[in-house]
Image (spheres, rainbow, N blue to C red):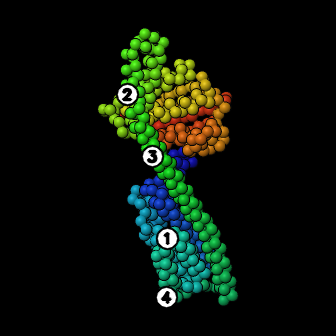
Amino acid sequence: MTPTASMVISGVSGWLSGARAAENANGPADAIARQNMLQLIHLRWIAVLGQVVTILAVHFSLGFKVPLAAMMLVLAGLVALNLFSLLRLKRGAPLGPYDLFAALALDALALTAQLYFSGGATNPFTTLYLLHVILGAVLLEAWATWAIVALTTFCFVMLLSFNRPIIASGLSDQAFFDLFLMGMLLGIVLDALLLVTFVGRINANLRRHDARLAELRQRAAEETHIVRMGLLASGAAHELGTPLATLDVILGDWRRMPIFAGNPELAQELEDMRGEVRRCKSIVTGVLMSAGEARGGEVRVSTLRAFMDEVAGEWRATRGDQALVYETDLVAKTPIAAESTLKQVIHNVLDNALEASPGAVRLWVGASEGWLRIQVDDDGPGFTDETLENFGAPYNSTKGRAGGGLGLFLVVNVLRKLGGAARAENRTEGGARVVLTLPLAALEIEDGRDA
């Protein structure tokens, strides 16, 4: 078989099985409904295949005369229903409360038609009605489950009322009874196997749905935690603004006093104090700007390379020139909106690395295929297994102090809001590595340009 033919067959097989059909889901609830519909589609394919084999075997091998044309027409209807269901899953519209109910109801009607043409109520495969009822109890709401119960009951009553006996040529009554018992056995075994298989799959879908909901609840709790911390930081920044301004004024007045004007050492210390006060004021302003409370003009425009150079330069200026080895392969001048929150994120990771490995921190920045990658390495002791497993969780820290771990918690959540992610690992040669990735589209002003 040629590779092209193999790809075509694989594609057709994947489409018929509904592979990736649940990717158009509109939320977790729709995703679970689509997965359950896929289970019904798979079950229907099995039913079609099994009925073809059974009908042909009964008609040609066992001597029972059944209306082949009518029964094959019912199977063609099931195939058409499956194809329609697959097309329905390809659409973006969410599955409604009646979709699964309609699918099970049509399957029950198709089963009734096949039973009518092959012995009616005396057909041993009437036990398959229980499969529809149990699946309805698992998949459907209460009203729909009772509707399926009513429908299957009505169908069986109709089979009793309009019984169409099957004609068996050349079989004694005992042989006919033995075949009936064998059919009952096969029907019960088939019910059990299908129920265990498909109810197990449906329960697995429900467990994944519950896990997804738990993850969303955890994320919402973390974001609420961030909001509380942001409000606390914003309030503290407002409170610190007034005393810092007062100190700046007082220190400015002291500069003109004779005792400082005539003493160069005191004058220098005074200037150092004023510099630290100005730095504190700058930090407070940055906190307020990050909280969206102090926008001084339009959003600052920069380039990706200039922004990263600025991030590295500012961090170096306050931590020592020898503390950082900075490398980048950014070349082109991609215009971006300079994100102060991203700068704080990178500084936070660099601070953690410097604390673990003083004087041995490396920063590498690169971009490819629309993604920005920021890598920070250190030569410290590395992360513990527990820290790696819970990376980004609040208060997950190896520093052993109260409140530790909030820095990386903020890093992970800020990147997540920008559409990116953060991961940590221990390097084989020793030390730790933190990798930040985010889409360039989250920063770029003009789309379609690479760094």
The location of residue 204, given as percent across then percent down, is: 58, 61
Circle 1/circle 2 CB separation < 8 Å: no
Please name whichever residue, 193 or 304, is drawn nearer the observer in this view of the structure: 304
Residue 29 against residue 244 in the figure, above or below:
below
The label on residue 140 is 1
The location of residue 443, given as percent across then percent down, is: 40, 35
Q: Residue at x 54, y 56 (%)?
A: 214
Please tell me whether mark 3 sits on a helix, a strand or a loop. Answer: helix
Q: Nearer the viewer, mark 1 or mark 2?
A: 2
In the picture of the structure, the residue carrying the numbered disc 4 is: 162
Please tell me whether mark 1 sits on a helix, a strand or a loop. Answer: loop
Residue type indicated by callout 1: Leu
The location of residue 127, given as percent across then percent down, is: 59, 79
Please name whichever residue, 401 or 218, is drawn nearer the observer in this view of the structure: 401
Specify whether 355 is left or right of 90: right
- Mark 2 or 4, nearer chain start: 4
Outermost residue to the left: 297
The label on residue 302 is 2
> Distance from label 1 to label 3 (Cα)?
39 Å
In the picture of the structure, the residue carrying the numbered disc 3 is: 227
Report which quarter residue 394 is drawn in. top right
- Disc 1 packing (10 Å; few <14; some 14–19; many ≥20): many
Q: Residue at x 58, y 43 (%)?
A: 395
Please tell me whether mark 4 sits on a helix, a strand or a loop. Answer: loop
Residue type indicated by callout 4: Phe
